[in-house]
Image (cartoon, helix red, strand yellow):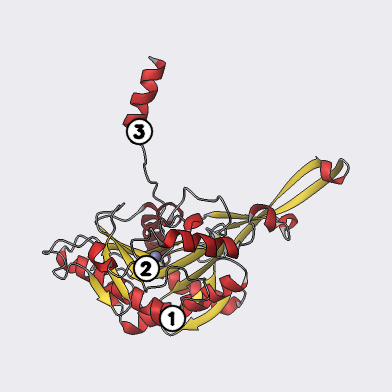
Amino acid sequence: MPEIIFEKSTQFASFHNPLMGGELTTHELELRYDPLTRHQSVFNPGMEGKSQMLYPDTDFDYMRERAEESKASCFLCPENWKENVPRFPQEMISEGILEQNRACLFPNLFPVGGNHAVVRLGNEHLRFLNEMPADLLQEGIQVSLDYIKRCHQYDSNLRYCTMNANYMFPAGASVMHPHFQIMALPEPTTYHKRLLDYSRTFYQDTAKCYWNELLTRERELQERWIGNTGTCDWIASYSPGGFNEIMAVWPEKESFLEWEEEDVQSLAKGLEKVLQLYHEMNLSTFNFSCYSAPMGIKSPEFKCVFRIANRQNVVRHHRTDDFFVQKMLGNEIILNRPETLADWLREKMG
Ligand SMILES: [Zn+2]
């Protein structure tokens, strides 16, 4: 594999356009390929300024209305919320739940991974994206890191860890109340594995770490380079996997096992700024995932990576079937077992 190349190609789409009296129009499309995974993104300049059609602005009044309605049934809101949350088995986490000031971590009631926890972020049921202060985010990330380290201590096979979030229902959240979701798994999810595999191949071919090379190239080019907050560097993704995707990389940290308070703080600081910008752009939702090298395995080919992207804004009557699990981790969720589906259809066809 060659070293980092920001590759592009062009495709043309021609048709007689009814919006222009049947005139022959040609759209010139720009395809971009992710320098690591070759993931493709496409840009049609003809769609600039027309994003309202595909991506309507947030209905902030509706968001307030929904928050008011959903508060009553929110299990994270009542004063006695702590008595209602699930608790870990004693042998795993003897305290039952983990706390870090305003952040509290407990098992997910509907897990989609062997160790899948939820972090409650403070008492406020509704926060707009400019109301997520770095100190609150830091507490949430810190308790997530504590959980990941505790899982790995409990069972060293739990080495594939991610910190994640769905924010608001168009991003897959089932509750509005701000929260994170953390996974510590015995095997990587589809996308996590892809990142690890491609990084290893790049390292084998070039004897260099892709992530450090990427930062060096982006810093030189100054096109997508944003800056750093302490121990992590921020860039806009060249070939994004979601709307307005921003990435952070920790050039000195392979896995969460190496993370210290300053790494947590660095993520919180940058994340606060990203969310502020999203709010200024009238956006209201996001998914994020932060990926680590396998815990406890020396991985010079990898560095911790964080990705955040927007989803459809909060508007009336919108939900989604893609959560962080599908969008950021590349795994699908099965709602009806394929075997059950076959049973149902077999009956009809029989
Ligand atoms: Zn709530």
What residue lies at 31% left-to-right and 78% top-to-bottom?
A: 259
Question: Which residue is under mark 3?
Answer: 338
First of labels 2, 1 by sequence position: 1
Query: Which label sits on residue 75?
Result: none
What residue lies at 43% left-to-right and 81% top-to-bottom?
A: 134
Please, what is the three-letter code of the amino acid marked with disc 3?
A: Pro
Q: Quadrant of ligand 1?
A: bottom left
Gap between marks 3 and 1, in whole Å?
43 Å
Q: In the rendered image, is residue 1 in sight?
A: no
Please, what is the three-letter code of the amino acid marked with disc 2?
A: Phe
Question: Which residue is under mark 1?
Answer: 134
What residue lies at 48% left-to-right and 63% top-to-bottom?
A: 67
- Place of residue 227 in the rendered image (x, y in percent of width and height, measured from the top left): 53, 81
Q: Determine which quarter of the picture holds residue 119.
A: bottom left
Gap between marks 2 and 1, in whole Å?
26 Å
Q: Is residue 177 above or below residue 312?
A: below
Question: Which residue is under mark 2?
Answer: 302
